[in-house]
Image (cartoon, helix red, strand yellow):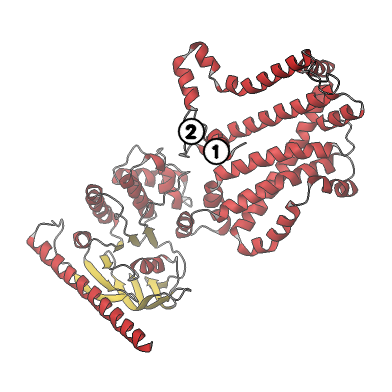
Amino acid sequence: MLRFDQIEKIYPNGTHALTHLSLELDAGEIVAIIGGSGCGKSTLLRLAAGLDRPSSGSVSVEDTVITAPHEAVGIVFQEPRLLPWLDVAGNIGFGLTHLPRAERHERVVRALERIGLAGYESAWPRELSGGQAQRVSIARALVARPKVLLLDEPFSALDAFTRADLQHALLALWEASRPTLALVTHDVEEAILLADRVVVMQPSPGRVFKEIRIDLPRPRHRLDDAFIAVERRVLHALDGSLGLARQRASTQANVAVGGW
Amino acid sequence: MARAELTADLVGRPAPAARRARAGGGLAAILSSPLVLGLALPVLLALVWEAAAALGLTSRRLMPPPSAIFATLFKLAASGDLWEHIWITTWRVAVGFVIGTVAGTLVGAAAGYSGLTRRLVDPTLQGLRAVPSIAWVPLFILWLGIFEQSKVALIAVGVFFPVYLGVMGEILSVDRKIVEVGRVFRLSGPALVRRILLPAILPAYILALRAGLGLGWMFVVAAEFMGASQGLGYLLVDGQQLGKPDQIIASILVFAVLGKLTDALLVAATRPFLRWKDGFAPAG
C-alpha cells in the first residue's frame, strides 16, 4: 500500500536525514516507527504526506508516486493544528468542501459520535482540552477516508490517562475503515499496544535498523508476559540502534581528531 | 489608538469596569460606563477652556470658547449646510476607503503569498508609501481634474498603504504549521489565501482597516483642500480665509466625532467574525 523505495533525504543545510531507506506497509496494517531523536522519523512521514520530496528514491501509494499531498494520504500532527477561526464541525469538515452540504454534515456528525464529542459541533478549538483537540484532529484526517493515515507522535503532548484513552479511540476508529496506519512514536509501549509491526530506526543518517512483528492478539495489555517480552525485544533493538549510532559518532570523532 | 486598545475593542469582550457597572447598577454604574468615562476627559477640557475664556485668560478671537463653537455648529446645522458638508466628506471617505481596501487587500495578499510578486512590487510600493500625501495633490489634479475623482483617488491612496502592509506583513507571519494543514488538503493558491491565510490574519487585517480608515479621514482634508466647494475640509479653508476660528474648531470637532463613529461602526461590523478569538482582557 505505502512503499518507500531507496529513499535519500538531504536538506538544503546539508543535514543528511535519511539514507538507503526502503520500507513497505501493507493495506490495513499498523506500523509503528520508533527511534532516537534525529533518526528521520518525522521526515519519513513528511515525505509520505507529500509535504517534502526525497532527494532520491520514491514514495508511492498503490503505485502512485507521491510528489505532493495526495487524497489517499491523511496526516495527524504532533499538535492538533486546528484552525481557530472554525468551530469543531468546520474543522472536521475542512477537507470535505467538495461534497454536498448534507453529505458533509452527515460525515461530520458521525465522526463526532465516533470520537466521543457528539454535541461539540459549535465549540471553538480554544474551548477544547488537549485530548479533545487531538481527537478532532484525528477525525479531520479520517473523514476524508484516506487509504493511508500518518500519525506523527499524535499523543506525545498528552498526559498518560488521556493518551491511553486516545490510543483506544484510535484503534476503534481504525477498526471502522482499516486504513494503513504509520505511527511515529517515542513510546515503546504505545508502539506495541497499537502496531502489527514495529520499525526501529537508527540515526545519523536515518535508516531502518530492525523490523519486529507483533503477533499479539488485541486488545493487548501492558502487564501481560507476552507484551513485556515483546517490549524487551523492542527495547533491545532500540538500544542496539542507539549503540550503533554512538559507535559511529565516536569513530567519526576519532577520524576528525586524526585529521587535526 | 494603542494596539492593545484596538485589539480589546475588536474582541468585543466587555471591560471589567463595564461588567462591574452592569452588576452594581445605580449612579456608580452610570459613572463607570464606557460612554461616560470616554466623555469625561473632553467634557472636563471643555469646562476648563470655557472657564479660562470667561476669566479672560485666553483670547476669545483666536481661541473661541466651547459655547461659541457649539453655537456655530448649531447655526450650521440649522441652516442644513453642516449636513451637506458632512455627507459629501463622508461619501468621499467611504468610496476612497472601499477602493483603497479592495486594492490593498488584493495586492497585499498577492505579495504575501507569492515571493516573486513581493520582490517585484514591494520595493516600489514602499518607496511610494514614503511620499507625503500632499505631494500627490498636483499630480492627481492634473490627471483627474479638480472634481471628485482626484479627491477619492487621494483618499484611496491613503487607505491602500496600511491595508497593503497589514495584509502582506501578516500573511508572512502566519504559522507555517497552519499553512501545512491547507497543503495537506491540497488547497489551490487562491483557496489557500481565502481559507487559511486571510482568516488567519483577520484580527490584524481589521486593525489595518481601522488604520486605513483613520488615514482616509486625514487624507480627505488634503483632498478637500484641492479646490473643493463642499465638505468639512472646505469649511476649514473657508474658516481660515474668512478669519472664523470657531468654524475651524467646529469642523475639527466634527472630524473627530465622525472618525470615532466610523471606527466604532467598523469594529461593530467586524466583531461577529472574531468570536473565535481568545485574547487578553486587561484588568481595571
Amino acid at the residue labelled 2: Pro
Mark carried by residue B41: none
Query: How many discs appear?
Result: 2
Q: Please report the residue visible at 10 percent of the width from the left and 57 percent of the height from the top.
A: A223
**Both labels 2 and 1 in a single chain:** yes
Instruction: Give SS at disc 2.
Output: loop
Query: In the displayed structure, does residue B224 sit left or right of residue B3?
Result: right
Q: Nearer the viewer, residue B70 or A40?
A: B70
Chain assignment, label 2: B
Position in image of residue A183 (x %, y %): 29, 62
Position in image of residue B193 (x %, y %): 56, 53
Q: Residue furthest bottom?
A: A259
Quadrant hosting residue A233: bottom left
Quadrant that contains the C terminus of chain A: bottom left
Task: Classify A233 as above or below A169.
Answer: below
Amino acid at the residue labelled 1: Ala
Q: Which residue is mark 1?
A: B4
Q: Please report the residue visible at 15 percent of the width from the left and 65 percent of the height from the top.
A: A231
Q: Nearer the viewer, residue B47 or A37?
A: B47
Position in image of residue A19 (x %, y %): 36, 79
Say if mark 2 contacts mark 1, CB within 8 Å.
yes
Position in image of residue A13 (x %, y %): 47, 73
Mark carried by residue B282: 2
Task: Classify B158 as above or below B62.
Answer: below
Q: Nearer the viewer, residue A144 or B152?
A: B152
Return the disc, 2 or 1, that comes first in the chain's sequence.
Answer: 1
